[in-house]
Structure formats: C-alpha cells, structure tokens
C-alpha cells in the first residue's frame, strides 16, 4: 500500500485503504502547523509545480505552503502570467515544466479529465487540484479529515450536501470518499442543479433541502458556481436563497451537534446565510487549516519523503 | 488509354439487387461489366489481353458507397484532402463516397461542386459524389442554389455538421427539392439541448463530470424532421442515428406512410459511452452524435437486423493529431472511419451471423445507390464495373499509423478483426488488392 510515484486524479479511483493512509499521515503531520518554526526537511530537494488554468486562492496557497513546510521548492504557473496566453498547448507547457526538473505537477483546469490527459503526457506524478465538473480529490480528503476530527468516525454518519451539485467537483470527490468509508450521503438542490442519474454516485437525492438536512451529522453547503450558470437554471439569487439556501431555520432540522461546512469561497446570503457560516457549528476555517495538513500528507506520500 | 479486360474468377458473387448469390465469374471490359456467369474463365483462357483476378474464397459484391464522409477539401487540407480521403476509401473497400459540404468555403454553389469534382478526377482514387449545402454558407437562412449544384454534379443536399436550422427552412428545402428529385440528408440535432455537451448524457457523464448530450437532442430533431417530411412529402434521409428513440420514431412515422431513409455508423453500432471514462478521457471517443448507452447499441443492432436501417455510413471525420491531443472539451468531435468501417461490420455482424452477406451488400451498396440516385448497387452487364471484394478470413489489425487517411483519430486502434476488404475495383480498374493500393500510373 503506497502512493509513491502515483497520480492522484480522483477519489473514485482511490481505495478506502489509500484514503485512510492519507488521513492518518495528515494526522501525524498536522502538528507541524502548530510549531513555532514550521519547517521539516522531509521534501528537501524536491520541486513541486502548481499549474493553474483557473483562478484559485485557497487551493494553490494551501499546496504551496504544504510543500514549503516540508522544505520542497515550489514554482507556480497561472494562466495570466504564462505562455498559455500565447496559445501553447497544455501538453507542451507541461512537458517544458517537466524537463526543468519538476517532481510533481499539481493542476487545476476548467475541463473535466484534463488531469487524466496530463497524466498521459507526463512521466512525473500529477495531482488533480480540481478539473471541471469532475473531481477535486484533495478537497474531498480534507473535508473527510475535518469530519473525522470532530466526529471520530465516518461510517454511519448522515451527510447532507446542498446546492449546486451539478457543477460541483467538490461534491463528487466528497461523495466518493464518504461512500467508500461508509457514510450515508444525501444531496439536495433545485432539480436543474442536480446531475442527471445522480444515484450512480451512491447518494439519496432530494428536491428540497429539508429532507436532506433532517437528522444530518454534517451539513455541507456548496458554492453556487455563478460563473458556470447558463440561463434558465434558476430564476434569481434571492429565490435560490429562499428555497435552497442554508439558513438558521433549516439548520435546526439537523442534529444539534451537526457540523456546517463549505469549500469556499462563500457567496454569503446566497447558498449560506452569514449567521450560519459564522456560527459555532461552522468548521469552515478548520477545513482550510486541515487542507494544508492533508496536502502535506499527499505530497509526502507521492514524493516518498523522509522524516 | 484502354485498360485490359479483367476476369474476376471464382468468387462468391453476392448481388441482392439481381437476387444472385453464387460462385460466378465476372468479365469486365472497357470499364463495364460484360458478363456474369459460370465458366467464363474458359472463354478467355490463354488470352493475354485479359487480366485474371482469382477471387476464390472471397465475397464479390457491387461497389460499396459510403454516403457520409468528410473529405475536408477545400479548406482543411491539414485534416484530409480529396486524394488522401479517397485513398482511405479505396483501402476501406469503397468505390464511391458522398462528400459533405462543410468545407471552407462551404460547398454551397456550382463552382465549389465543380472544384470538388475536378479535384476528384485529377487526384481521386474512387468516385466522389459532392453533397451540396442546403442553405447558403450553411447558415440556415437562405436556400442555396441547389438546382445549379445538381446540374454541376451534386447528388444530394445537407447542412451536415449542423442540422437544417429551422422547421420552416426544412419545409421549404424539402418542397423545393421536389422539382429536382434529390434527397435532403439531415443531421438531426436540437442545438439548444446539445449545447456545451461533450458526451452522451447518462450515468457516465455524471461521474466523468461532463455536461451531457441527451438522447432527446437527437429525437426532438428526428421528430421535427419526420413531421416536416410528412407535411411536404419530400425526400428525406436522416444520417448517423444513434438512439433507440430515433428508431422508434422512424418506425412510427413509416407505419403512418411517411417515407424516410436512415443510416447509422459502425461506431454507434459497436461502442458505448462507457469508454469515454474507462479509456481515461481519450478524445478519440469524442464524436457527434455521442457514443450512447448499451440499450441504444442493442436497439441499433436490432434495427440493423430487422431492416429498419437502410445504410451504414462512416461519418468519416478525420482530424489532425494536434486537434485531438488536447483537453477533452477542446478536441473536435469525430472519428476517422473509412478504413475500419467494413472490417468492423464484417467482424462484428456478418461473421457471427447477425446479418447476411446479402444484407451487407444492401447496407453498403444497393441502398446508398438508391437513396443518392447514383449508378451502382448491382452487378449487371452494361453497368460500370464498380466492385468490392471481401476476404472473410483475412486477419486485420487496426493500426492508425498505417491509415491512408490523414486522420488517425480512431477508437479502434489495436483492434484485431477478421474479414476485411480485399480488393476495390472502380470502373474496371483495380484500386486496391490484398490490402495494397495499386497506382496504375495514369
């Protein structure tokens, strides 16, 4: 059981054992974040490249800090600053990066499957930092790590995922991971934003949020992906919030100690109300902290680092 | 230049239009069939002016016609041109192809039809039948000068690549073509339902994270087209149907007297949308209409057996490697099909006994000739000697690198097939024999 030298493209393709390996490794690396000097030599001499074809604050920073805390060197390439603007193909850009000595490429891309394509192009491992509407596996892992931190188990939990599931790679990764570890996943949103044949993901589908939230241990609100909306999916942000947003009243349907989660960035007042986002039940910022630990674990395992 | 007479000796001649299925000889003279019968070899024995092609053990059929190919010329010669596309056709066992008009400029006028025909005469390896655009610039607004294009040599009309834009334009085009008797070939697609879609809508698209193209993007358009065919009594052919629902609609309208003909592609008869994901987002699986579900494939095969389907066409859509070696959304739709088409159908459907050799000849020759209104479809004295010969025992491994087509974009690379085109004869000239193209130097 090892992730050394392998790609991380999706949680669908990752075994429960490998997921548990990442989680336990992250658990032991997390204490580094609390040290006064946040630096271990585990990945000294390794080069980590982030290649982002879509904007990102959290994920890219999280990967870069994870790499730096373990003494790897990092380079980051984003669409606005690179030869991508000059029409260079993904395959060419990536191979150029590879021959300069990169040990792993972390990519975000607007096209589903782009990381699978990159993995065919490159010899070095590829980590998917979000591809189109397909998956965002490290987000799924950090979400599960966070749930585990508060609930001490995954098996048997009821998790409600609310909102724009159709466009959400976060929802797909989280669902695969949770299902593999034995949680029960409910999704809810307007039917225009629920993927067709969603049952194949192993979820129970609700057309209104209440049924999904009822008795839930975790209520996960998804960002309404305004940039991906076409006409006629929903009438207005206000109506969306009224009928499908996570607010105080709806949250009461969940268990008293239910966690409130969100992958960020939040559209406050649309998919989640501010009082819920900032409530004591919210672990949204803890997700972000855990993201660094989980990404340290992934880099450590894939690059075969040493303590 | 006079070509030698040709004796095709001892093959099993399958010629359903003449109700023939027997081991016979065929004598060809001056590009035409001179005689079909037993023991013709005795009459020419020792005659050095007659070339003898030993077809024993082979299946000899009227020349195959692929009624839907993209030769890409003029305008996209990096993907294919008339020479490379017709070499691919000859290699694939086709004596004629119908070339779609979505070129640059589009084939929407007499001059471009003439250009295609001139290029085909100069550089073509098989017959090329230009398909003219239905509307000017394929824009779906004004009718193109279809009468003039017919006189110049176009055989049918289509805005392929796109559907005929609206019910009203389709109505006018079908009515107008009644004065000329030519067929309108529509690519049925409701663009509002397919917009942004990358693959079939189904469980796989949801897992793969793609906006899907639902069956209804096709069936809504098929229903529209059939209603308008009923309204006008026009001559309509629907190409590359891919869904069970489309076939049910076709049967339903036919029972009510609407005349329509249809074709399907080999890839829709064989592959499902599963491979888009399981092959790691291979852009060679990206095609429009998309590869559908297992249920659709079964329905298509059933319709192949029961006669609902009139023809098989490749929708040969060659693309350059540069176009396909990119992220899935950025890759164009299309499969390079001419060189695998016949072998796939023989291997998958004829050899296992799902369809007969006679039905194969109907699908690839008799019906395409009839639908397009072109010569061929039979091996009769006096007809042009266009003949396709298949070796049912030939082992054929698909190697895209060896394609004559410039388009190496096939999902069938590495497949091993049994039964493949063994010779292609156009107007009495052997263009391909034993999997090798033959240049007569003329």
Image: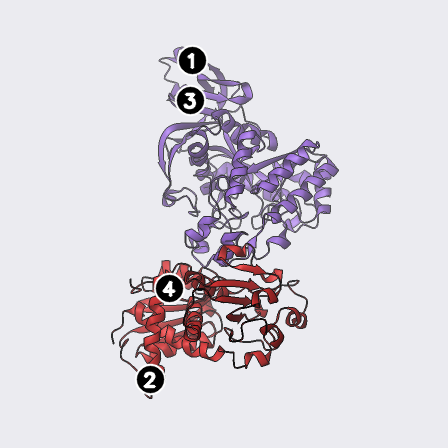
Q: Secondary structure at mark 3?
A: loop
Mark nearer the N terminus (3 vs 1): 3
> CA–CA distance between discs 3 and 1?
16 Å
Q: Secondary structure at mark 4?
A: loop
Find residue A253 and report its image quarter: bottom right
Q: In the picture, one chain is purple; tell me its letter.
A: B
- Between label 2 and label 3, give the one nearer the viewer: 2
Does residue A141 appear anywhere in the picture? yes
- Residue at position x 37%, y 62% from top? A16
* Picture coordinates of residue B158, whole percent (x, y): 62, 43
In front of the other: B367 or B207? B207
CB within 8 Å, label 1 to label 4? no
- Residue at position x 59%, y 80% from top? A274
> CA–CA distance between discs 1 and 4?
68 Å
Whether residue A264 sits left or right of residue B107 in the image: it is: left
Residue highlighted by disc 3: B4
State whether residue B257 is above or below residue B246: above
Mark nearer the N terminus (2 vs 4): 4
- Between label 3 and label 4, give the one nearer the viewer: 4
Residue highlighted by disc 2: A38
Residue highlighted by disc 1: B40
């Amino acid at each position: 059981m090892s992730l050394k030298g392998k790609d991380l493209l999706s949680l669908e393709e990752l075994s429960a054992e490998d997921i548990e390996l990442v989680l336990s490794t992250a658990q032991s690396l997390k204490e580094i974040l609390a040290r006064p000097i946040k630096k271990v030599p585990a990945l000294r001499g390794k080069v980590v490249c982030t290649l982002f074809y879509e904007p990102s604050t959290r994920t890219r920073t999280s990967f870069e800090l994870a790499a730096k805390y373990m003494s790897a060197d990092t380079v980051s390439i984003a669409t606005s600053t690179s030869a991508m603007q000059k029409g260079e193909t993904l395959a060419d850009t990536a191979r150029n990066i590879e021959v300069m000595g990169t040990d792993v490429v972390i990519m975000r891309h607007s096209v589903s499957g782009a990381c699978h394509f990159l993995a065919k192009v490159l010899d070095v491992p590829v980590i998917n930092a979000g591809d189109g509407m397909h998956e965002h596996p490290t987000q799924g892992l950090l979400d599960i790590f966070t749930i585990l931190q508060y609930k001490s188990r995954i098996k048997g939990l009821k998790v409600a995922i609310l909102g724009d599931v159709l466009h959400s790679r976060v929802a797909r990764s989280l669902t695969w991971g949770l299902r593999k570890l034995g949680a029960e996943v409910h999704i809810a949103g307007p039917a225009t934003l629920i993927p067709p044949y969603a049952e194949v993901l192993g979820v129970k589908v609700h057309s209104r949020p209440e049924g999904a939230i009822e008795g839930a241990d975790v209520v996960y609100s998804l960002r309404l992906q305004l940039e991906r909306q076409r006409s006629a999916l929903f009438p207005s942000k206000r109506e969306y919030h009224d009928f499908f947003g996570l607010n105080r009243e709806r949250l009461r349907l969940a268990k008293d100690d239910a966690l409130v989660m969100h992958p960020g960035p939040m559209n406050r007042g649309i998919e989640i109300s501010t009082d819920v986002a900032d409530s004591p039940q919210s672990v949204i910022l803890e997700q972000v902290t855990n993201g660094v630990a989980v990404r340290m674990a992934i880099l450590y395992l894939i690059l075969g680092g040493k303590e | 230049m006079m070509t030698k007479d040709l004796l095709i000796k001892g093959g099993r001649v399958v010629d359903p239009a003449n109700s023939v299925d027997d081991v016979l000889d065929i004598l060809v003279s001056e590009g035409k069939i001179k005689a079909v019968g037993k023991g013709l070899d005795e009459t020419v024995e020792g005659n050095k002016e007659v070339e003898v092609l030993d077809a024993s053990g082979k299946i000899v059929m009227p020349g195959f016609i692929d009624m839907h190919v993209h030769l890409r010329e003029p305008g996209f010669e990096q993907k294919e041109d008339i020479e490379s596309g017709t070499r691919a056709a000859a290699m694939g066992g086709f004596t004629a192809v119908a070339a779609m008009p979505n070129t640059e400029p589009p084939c929407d006028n007499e001059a471009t039809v003439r250009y295609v025909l001139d290029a085909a005469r100069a550089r073509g390896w098989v017959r090329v039948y230009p398909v003219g655009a239905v509307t000017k610039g394929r824009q779906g607004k004004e009718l193109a000068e279809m009468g003039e294009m017919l006189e110049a040599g176009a055989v049918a009309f289509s805005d392929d690549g796109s559907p005929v834009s609206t019910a009203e334009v389709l109505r006018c085009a079908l009515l107008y073509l009644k004065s000329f008797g030519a067929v309108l070939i529509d690519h049925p697609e409701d663009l509002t339902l397919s917009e942004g879609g990358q693959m079939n809508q189904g469980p796989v698209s949801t897992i793969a994270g793609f906006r899907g193209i639902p069956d209804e993007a096709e069936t809504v358009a098929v229903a529209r087209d059939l209603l308008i065919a009923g309204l006008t009594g026009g001559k309509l052919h629907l190409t590359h149907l891919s869904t069970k629902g489309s076939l049910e609609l076709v049967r339903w309208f036919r029972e009510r007297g609407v005349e329509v003909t249809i074709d399907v592609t080999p890839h829709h008869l064989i592959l499902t949308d599963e491979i888009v994901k399981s092959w790691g987002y291979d852009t060679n699986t990206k095609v429009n209409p998309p590869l559908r579900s297992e249920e659709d494939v079964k329905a298509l095969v059933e319709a192949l057996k029961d006669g609902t389907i009139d023809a098989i066409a490749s929708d040969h859509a060659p693309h350059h490697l540069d176009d396909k070696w990119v992220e899935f959304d950025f890759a164009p739709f299309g499969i390079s099909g001419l060189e695998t088409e016949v072998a796939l159908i023989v291997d998958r459907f004829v050899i296992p006994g799902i369809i007969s050799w006679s039905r194969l000849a109907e699908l690839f020759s008799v019906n395409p000739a009839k639908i397009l209104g072109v010569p061929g479809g039979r091996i009769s004295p006096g007809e042009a000697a266009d003949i396709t010969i298949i070796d049912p025992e030939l082992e054929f491994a698909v190697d895209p690198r060896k394609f004559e087509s410039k388009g190496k974009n096939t999902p069938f690379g590495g497949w091993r097939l049994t039964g493949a085109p063994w010779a292609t004869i156009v107007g009495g000239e052997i263009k391909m024999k034993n999997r090798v193209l033959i240049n007569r130097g003329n």
